[in-house]
Image: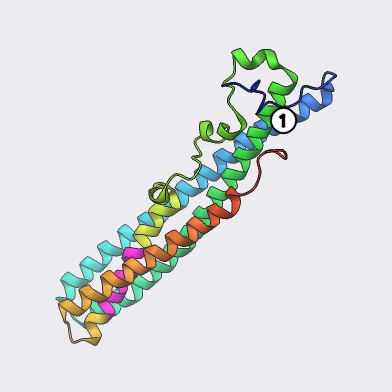
């Protein structure tokens, strides 16, 4: 199906676009592509720094456990380290989600510019990938809906999983101290808190994507 479909095509203009308009549109397209690259680089960079901090912190926790024979120093260090890493995970998740939303906005604007190209140069349909309005986001890597499992495929979703594990680990360690080193209490508390934290983060992410998904790509759609 092409952009000339009667149900999806944009009305053809009566005159050619002004040369200045062409310059503005092409410059905007180039700028938006650069902005998309920056948001992706920031998301991956922040996620990488977070995972490096988690890796280093867990190595340090293991060394303290070895040195103290899982004594008071281990619990004190763990109850300071794990909540700190959890906080870093939360802010990384939030920023990664913001970057994803920004990237989605840039993609929508690029899709509108592609419609402008086909509107004023319909002869390009045979050379550029031309698809209906409803599919112009999907071809740029953005799925509509995506199902419940789509949240795990984003950078924010990955950070959410690691953060939930850290929050659960902190809760389990605290439960072990309070219950007199009971393994059952630590496991139950850790798993429950981790699951609840993960569900809350994924629900927050899903609500953020739902808010922007209702925005119309084209005024008449």
Residue 110 shows in the view: yes
Residue 48 shows in the view: no
Q: How packed is label 1: few (under 14 Cα within 10 Å), some, or many (20 or more)?
A: few
* Kind of element beneath mark 1: helix
Q: Which residue is mark 1?
A: 27
Q: Which stretch did the figure color magenta?
A: 164-174
Q: Residue 98 at what x, y percent from top left?
A: 55, 54
The one nearer the camera, 22 or 147, is: 147
Q: Residue 162 at what x, y percent from top left?
A: 34, 59
At a point 43% along the width and 49% down the height, the residue shown is 155
Q: Is residue 217 toward the left or the right of residue 169 in the image? A: right
Q: From the viewer's perspective, is residue 208 above or below residue 154?
A: below
Quadrant placement of the C terminus: top right
Q: Is residue 81 toward the left or the right of residue 178 in the image? A: right
The one nearer the camera, 94 or 135, is: 135
At a point 31% along the width and 73% down the height, the residue shown is 170
Q: From the viewer's perspective, is residue 18 above or below residue 133?
A: above
Q: Residue 195 at what x, y percent from top left?
A: 32, 66
Per the picture, the main secondary structure of the magenta-coloured stretch is helix
Outermost residue to the front: 7
Q: Is residue 111 toward the left or the right of residue 165 in the image? A: right
The one nearer the camera, 196 or 133, is: 133
């Amino acid at each position: 199906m092409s952009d000339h479909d009667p149900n999806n095509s944009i009305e053809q203009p009566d005159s050619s676009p002004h040369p200045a308009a062409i310059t503005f549109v092409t410059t905007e397209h180039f700028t938006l592509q650069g902005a998309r690259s920056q948001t992706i680089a920031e998301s991956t960079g922040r996620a990488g720094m977070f995972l490096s901090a988690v890796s280093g912190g867990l190595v340090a926790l293991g060394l303290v456990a070895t040195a103290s024979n899982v004594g008071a120093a281990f619990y004190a260090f763990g109850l300071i380290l794990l909540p700190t890493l959890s906080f870093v995970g939360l802010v990384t998740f939030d920023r990664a989600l913001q970057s994803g939303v920004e990237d989605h906005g840039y993609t929508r604007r690029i899709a509108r510019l592609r419609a402008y190209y086909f509107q004023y140069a319909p002869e390009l349909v045979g050379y550029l990938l031309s698809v209906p309005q409803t599919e112009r986001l999907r071809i740029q890597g953005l799925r509509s809906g995506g199902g419940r499992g789509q949240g795990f495929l984003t950078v924010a979703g990955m950070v959410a999983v690691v953060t939930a594990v850290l929050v659960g680990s902190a809760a389990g360690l605290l439960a072990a101290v309070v219950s007199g080193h009971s393994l059952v209490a630590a496991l139950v508390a850790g798993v429950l808190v981790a699951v609840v934290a993960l569900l809350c983060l994924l629900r927050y992410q899903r609500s953020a994507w739902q808010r922007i998904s209702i925005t119309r790509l084209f005024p008449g759609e």
